[in-house]
Amino acid sequence: MPPLLRDTTAADLPAITAIYADEVLHGTATFELDPPDAAEMGARLGSVRTLDLPWLTAEVDGVVVGYAYLAPFRLRPAYRYCVELSVYLAPEARGRGIGRALMEALIQRARAMGLRHLIGVIGDSANDGSIALHKATGFREAGVWRETGWKFDRWIDVVLMQLDLTPDGRPPESDGLRL
C-alpha cells in the first residue's frame, strides 16, 4: 500500500519525535547524541513553517512511519535559493519506497517554490541506502567531509549530495526564502 503523504500537524509530533529519537540513539543520519523532546521537535517544525517551507508526514494504515522537510541550507541571504532536504523513517518503513515518495514530493514543492538547489547532508559515507536513494532521485555527490563527526566511538564522514533544479543557470524566477 502506498503511503499517504500530507502536511505535518502537531498531532504527528509524538511519532516524529520517536522516529528521530531512534535515529539519534541507533543511527548515523544525525550527529545529535541526545534525542530532543516533542517540544523541541515542535519548535523545529515551527521554524521550518515560518519560512513557508514544507514538512511532510508519511502514513501507512493510519500510522506515522516517516517524515521529511526542507530547511535553509545556510542562513545568509545569498543562499536563499538553496535548501537542505531531510528524510527520517521508522525502521520498519525502510526499503519500502516511502523515503523516495517523501523526497519526490519535496522535490516537486521545491521546484514550485522557484528554488535552485536541494542539498542532502548524509551522515556516514557507509550509509549506502541513503546515498542510493539520493542518487535515484537525481542527486549527485558534491563532496565528502571526512571524519567530521564522533559518534558510537568512531569518526564518521558527512556526504554532501546536490540536486540542481535549474541546472542551466538562468536567473531566479522567485525571491527565494525570506532569510
Image (cartoon, rainbow, N blue to C red):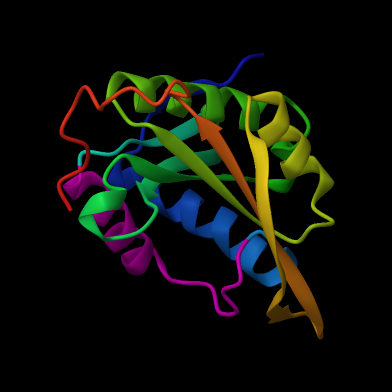
Task: Name the spot of residue 10 as percent of width and height, x first.
Answer: 29, 47
The quarter holding residue 94 reads top right
| Quadrant housing the N terminus | top right
The residue lying toward the viewer, choosing from 2 and 168, is 168
On the picture, is 164 further left or further right than 148? left
Answer with left or right where residue 117 lies relative to residue 147: left
From this viewpoint, is residue 46 visible?
Answer: no
Q: Is residue 88 above or below residue 113?
A: below
Q: Position of residue 155 (x, y in %)?
A: 78, 79
Q: Residue at x 18, y 27 (%)?
A: 174
Query: What residue range appears in magenta?
Result: 30-51
**Could you say which is closer to the camera, residue 157 or residue 77?**
77
Is residue 159 shown above or below 128? below
Note whether residue 108 is visible.
yes
Q: Is residue 35 magenta?
A: yes
**38 and 102: which is toward the camera:** 102
Residue 147 in percent (x, y) is at 75, 75
Residue at point 18% right, 53% down?
Answer: 179
Q: Quadrant of residue 87?
A: top right
